[in-house]
Image: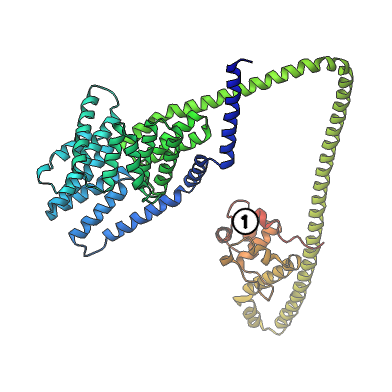
Amino acid sequence: MNSWSVFQRYALILTFCISFSFCVAGNPLDSLLTELDQTIRNEEIYTQQKVSYIENLQFKLSAAFLTPEDQYLLYQQLAKEYGIFRCDTAIYYANQRLRLAEEIGNTDWIQESKFQLASMLAKACMFEKAIDLLRTVDQAVLAPHLQVLYYKTFRDTYIYYSEFYQEGYEIHEISRLRAAYQDSLLRVVPTPSFDYVLAYGTYYIETGEFDRAEELLLSYYERLRPDTRDFALLASILAYLAEKKEDEWQRKVYLAQSAIADIKAANKENISLRFLAHLLFLDGDIKRANVYIKKSMDDANFFNGRLRNTQTSMVFPIINEAYQTERLQQQKKLMLLLGVVSLLSCILIITLGFIKRQINKLSRAQQEILQINERLNKLNTDLQQANRIHKEMNTNLKEANYIKEQLIGTFLEICTEYIDKFQKFKVFVNRKVKVGQLNDILKVTGKADNGSQELKDLYANFDKAFLAIYPDFVEEFNKLLREEERYPVKEDQSLNHELRIFALVRLGITDSTKIATFLHYTLRTVYNYRHKVKSKAFHPDEDFEERIRQVCQPDL
């Protein structure tokens, strides 16, 4: 065994031991990615908190008796909040802030408003407009803190400019101006301050002074809350430092921390998640990369700034490549499985030759059994269907016979009653005629309420006969109606007009003309009653009357 083979063996053992120790100790990056996954799932919570805070500011802005100064401060705060949330709305409030500052006449406020508006215009890729606005500021008369904003805004504008025009003859001039304003910013930025840390930290990275950059950035990094925009920004710069140091693992850690902070701060103008998605894609974690890329695209579309939209449009090839890679992996797995199957097939083919006849015979027998079972199952199904239909027919016949018996009994009772009434009336008329009291006959036969009384008797007899067959009709009928529209159950066992119409429907009489003739209603009245009751139902559809015909099966 040569020395190179020995070296390879020890290298493999050392690699295994290191990997095992990482697995035992736990990987901080895995924990961060798990936390990031959960944070993305909870994104709506953080976004809603942001929206609620903004709505509270807008509510304050609508209050009466606000001074112009109060309005200015609210516009300033709204423009700041929207500055990392929604670009076009931030531009609107920055314009409002500038307009009000000019009306008030406060020079410092005017300059601050111009800086904020220029920054948002640059994010919307309106670079020339942003630069023209900044050039209206007289740098010589600016207060120290405004000079910082002046150079910082100019520098950021040219940074966005260079990100948008990544190549071309203009990029060299843009880079030169960005570097010039960066140098001017370094001369005026106060220490200690967050702007100082960002400016000099970035400067040290670009000049290769990585130790100084890391010391400066980490000294401030530990003071920040991990759910703020400042934390996310500082973490992204630390990720940039790790990239320059070619420490990809540490870069992913800082990008994950930055992405988590961006989501918790409801910052839609972010880049860390997009960079992290690309790194994970290169590592083969395609599923996570797709989730992060989609989230980054959604944020860019929501922020509605042209710069981030343009940058995220470059992500589409990554998504396509991810799908292609995944498909290639599946194809490789399939080819491997096909190779294994082919090998097993070659091994088994000899054995199969010996038992082929037996298998064929068994297969034919099983097929025949399956066919017989299918026929038996079909016959059994048909028999069950026939039995069910037969049972339903018997039930319907029994119900029809029961109803017929009940109605015939009621009919005979009514006929007997009316025969008795007719005999009494005949005797009464005969007696009056004999004694010549024709006026009494005319009085009796001319009463207006005779017909209405007969109708009342008809309704009463019908209600009595129907409820004798279906005693729970009203309760069952009410179950089909909304609770506030239900009918009370009367103690005198009578039905109202609407229930009486649907009682006839339950008996199978659905023709409105027949119902109107039987109940001495007009056809229009019957139609109106039916439509009115349907409108009270839970489901006022065409099947409503069919459900009426299914309620209250009588005890047979």
Scheme of colours in the image: rainbow
Q: Residue at 48% across / 25% down in the picture?
A: 321
Is residue 536 or residue 400 the one in the foreground? 536
Pick the residue in front: 107 or 87. 107
Query: Left or right: 208 with respect to 67?
Result: right
Q: In this view, does 452 lie above or below 204?
A: below
Q: In this view, does 479 lie above or below 387?
A: below
Q: Quadrant of the N terminus?
A: top right
Residue 215, x across and y down, in percent: 34, 42
Where is residue 114, by image quadrant?
top left
Residue 217 sits above or below residue 536 on the image: above
Q: Which of 34 and 416 is in front in this view?
A: 34
Which quadrant of the view contains residue 172?
top left
- Neighbor class of circle 1 (other Cα within 10 Å; few <14, some 14-19, many 20+) is some
In the image, 516 versus 134, the foreground residue is 134
The relative height of residue 33 versus residue 433 in the rendered view (above or below) is: above
- Give the residue at mark 1: 513
Give how far across and how far down residue 359 sits, in percent.
Answer: 87, 21
Give x and y (percent) for residue 555.
80, 63
> Quadrant location of the C terminus?
bottom right
Q: In this rendering, would 409 be left or right of 99?
A: right
